[in-house]
Every structure is written in structure tokens, then in C-alpha cells.
Amino acid sequence: MPRFHCPEVLITGAELDLPPGAARHVQVLRLQPGDGITLFHGGQGAGDPGGEFDATVLRMGRSDVRVVVGAHHAVEREAPRAVHLLAGITANERMDWLVEKATELGVASITPLVAERSVLKLKGERAEKKLAHWQAVAVAACEQCGRNRVPVVHDAVDLAGWVRAHGAATGLAGTPASPQRLLLSLRAGTAPLRGAVEPGSERAVVFLSGPEGGLSAAEEDLALQHGFAPTTLGPRVLRAETAPLAALAALTL
């Protein structure tokens, strides 16, 4: 059954118009009144019960589609360990591909990193448009792969800005542990990724990976000073858009 993200509050029995993107997709599929679809809110605001809802098409307009919301199903397909990706911005369409595949692999959130060696530099209106585009890519990936929680694509930031915003790497006494911080590094003596995480633990992870050419020595030093443990994915050097996906697969599957 076709799945669509719907940021509106979903309540069984309610009638609503699908958002423009979902409505266009329904029309492209040539669905008709009486056809069934699946809706999910995505977990990006108040009033989301989680899971997904059956829905039935009521009316097909020229540019709008009205549906009635059916039964709620409390099904979730999230990874047991939340992995937050801090990824160097890659060039051209490679970042689109990274966002799409990271979403499919269960990433909890993505923060595009403006690194010293990033080819693509974002600021102002261009940055806003790119972030909106990447968020839409994540939504489409959730519709395809079955996730009911859309990962947030945060504002692009440099590493110094990120560590200022997130502070120390460990939680305060008596509070849940903050996410474990891991850094993809080519430095000698770096530990394998699988050995860096606690076996059987569901503690969240922030995984830092650089752009083409990797992080600079200064950026790696800054990360190490703020609690990132250096890890490796093996003897081969993976592309900037491949390495974080390999890490995600190891951490979430």
C-alpha cells in the first residue's frame, strides 16, 4: 500500500487534504476514491501518536486529494540504537544520496558539517534551500523504506560551533549518559568501530565523518579534545559518502 508522510495531526475518523507533495504523488499513481493508502506523521512535532494510519481516498481534485483517516497501527521500525550523524558536506548530488541512504539505514538525525575541506559552502538563502531539500529527501526515503520517524536534518554548522552547542561528552551524575562520540579517523592505532561500542548497549552514538579529503588535523584534534574516540572501518579508504553509511550499517543493523 502506498505510504505518505502527513505533518497534519492524524486522528481516526478525521477527514483532511493531503499536503501538496503527497497529493501529487497520489495523482501520479492514478489512485481513485475508495483506494487505500498509509499515512504517518513522522515524529517531528506535537500530537504525533507514532506508528502509522490506514486512510482511504475520498475525493480526487485537480490539485488536491481528500482522505479519511482510518485505524491506527502502533508499529515502529526504528533501530534499537539512535545514531546521530555529523557528516561533512559532500559535493553535487552525493549529499542527497548520503541523506537518502542514511535515512534508510535508520539514522536518528543528520547534521551537515561545514568542514575545512568541504567543497560545497552553504550560507544564507542557499543554505535554507539546501536544508529544505535534504529534509524532503529524508521524508521521501521514509515513505519508501517504511520508517514512521523522519530524521531531522539540522542546520549546517562547523565543528567548532557544534562542540560549543553540545558541550561535554558525558552526562551529569544521576542523569542518562549522553551519546557516545565516535570519530572516523585514518590515524595509526585507531580502534575498529565494532570494538568501540559497548556490546548489547542501546546508548546513542554521535558519529563524525569528514567530507572529501577527510577532516583536517586541526578538526580531528578539536574532536578528540571534546570526547570523540577515533575509530576505523578497516584497511580500505572509503569515499566520503560511503564511510558514514558503512558505520551506520554496523551500528544499527
Image (tube, helix red, strand yellow):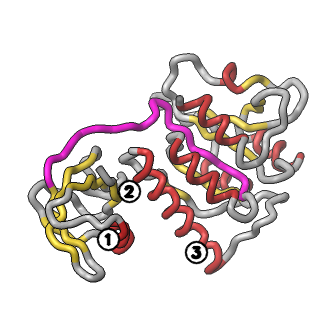
Q: Position of residue 146 (x, y in %)?
A: 39, 44
Mark 1 highlights which residue? 27
Residue at the spot x=64%, y=41% of the render? 245
Residue pointed to by mark 3: 129
Q: Which residues are magenta?
A: 70-89
| Residue 108, x across and y down, in percent | 50, 44
Residue 198: where, in percent of width, then height?
59, 20
For marks 2 and 3, the one nearer the N-term is 2
Position above or below: 108 against 251: below
Residue under the image location 84 percent in, 37 percent down = 237
Residue displayed at 19% across by 59% down:
35
Do tag 2 and tag 3 residues touch (Cβ < 8 Å)? Answer: no
Q: Nearer the viewer, residue 176 or 103?
A: 103
Q: How many marks?
A: 3
Q: Amino acid at mark 3?
A: Lys
- Distance from the alpha carbon under mark 3 to that under mark 1: 26 Å
Q: Alpha-carbon neighbours of circle 3 within 10 Å: few (<14), some, or many (≥20)?
A: few
Residue pointed to by mark 2: 44
Q: Left or right of 115: which side holds 189?
A: right
Q: Nearer the viewer, mark 2 or mark 3?
A: 3
Which numbered marker is on residue 40? none
Direction from residue 3 to residue 90 in the image, left or right: right
Select label 1 or label 2 by which is in front. 1
Do the CB atoms of the residues marked 3 and 1 lie less than 8 Å apart?
Answer: no
Q: Residue at x 62, y 29 (%)?
A: 250
Q: Earlier in the sequence, mark 3 or mark 1?
A: 1
From the viewer's perspective, is residue 106 above or below residue 10? above
* Residue 74 within the segment the image draws in magenta: yes
Q: Identify the amino acid type marked 2.
A: Gln
> Gap in Å between the C-alphas at discs 2 and 3?
19 Å
Q: What type is the residue that disc 1 sits on?
A: Gln
Check disc 3 and report its element: helix, strand or loop.
helix
